[in-house]
Image (tube, rainbow, N blue to C red):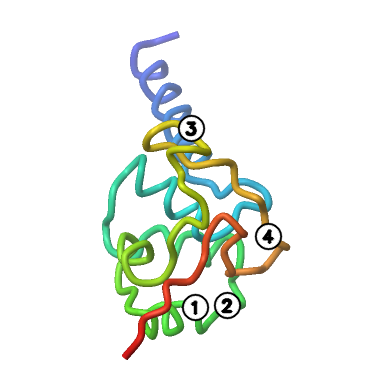
Amino acid sequence: METSDLVLSLEAELRLAARLLILPAAGECLACYVARMLGEFGCTGSRWVLHYRDLRTPRATALVRRLQDMGVYCDCQMFQNAYRPTLDLDSVAGIGELPPCLGVRAGSTRPCTNWERIRRGW
């Protein structure tokens, strides 16, 4: 195998691995997915919310507006303004780790029961 063929083959394998790495798991909720992606890659706008929507809930056309109504304009704001863990994560998982997602039905944008809505009083 020539060097250029090897390089092309390795690049193809890396692209496939990257796509698999950012794929939402079967039944994984939006909040668990976004939290997992933030932990791996950080916040880059609404990249992870939009990626999840496009792959798992393409009919959720109002998702971005609904999140904006909760004060979420980028991925990291989901956990500042919309959802918080229902349990003390340090007692359930290791420090900085999330417990496994408890799952949601296909097509849902609701969080699993690991998360609760942050209610803001006005």
Identified at 61% across, 62% down, the residue is: 56
**Residue marked by disc 3:** 17
- Image spot of residue 63 (x, y percent): 49, 78
The local secondary structure at tag 1 comes to: helix
Disc assigned to residue 60: 2
77 up-or-down from 68: above or below: above
Disc assigned to residue 63: 1
**Between residues 24 and 84, which one lies in front from this camera angle?**
84
What is the three-letter code of the residue carrying label 2? Answer: Ala
| Marks 2/4: CA–CA distance | 15 Å
What is the three-letter code of the residue carrying label 4? Answer: Val
Whichever of callouts 1 and 3 sits on the residue coming sooner in the sequence is: 3
What is the three-letter code of the residue carrying label 3? Answer: Ala
- Image spot of residue 7 (x, y percent): 36, 20
**Between residues 48 and 19, which one lies in front from this camera angle?**
48
Whichever of callouts 3 and 4 sits on the residue coming sooner in the sequence is: 3
The local secondary structure at tag 3 comes to: helix
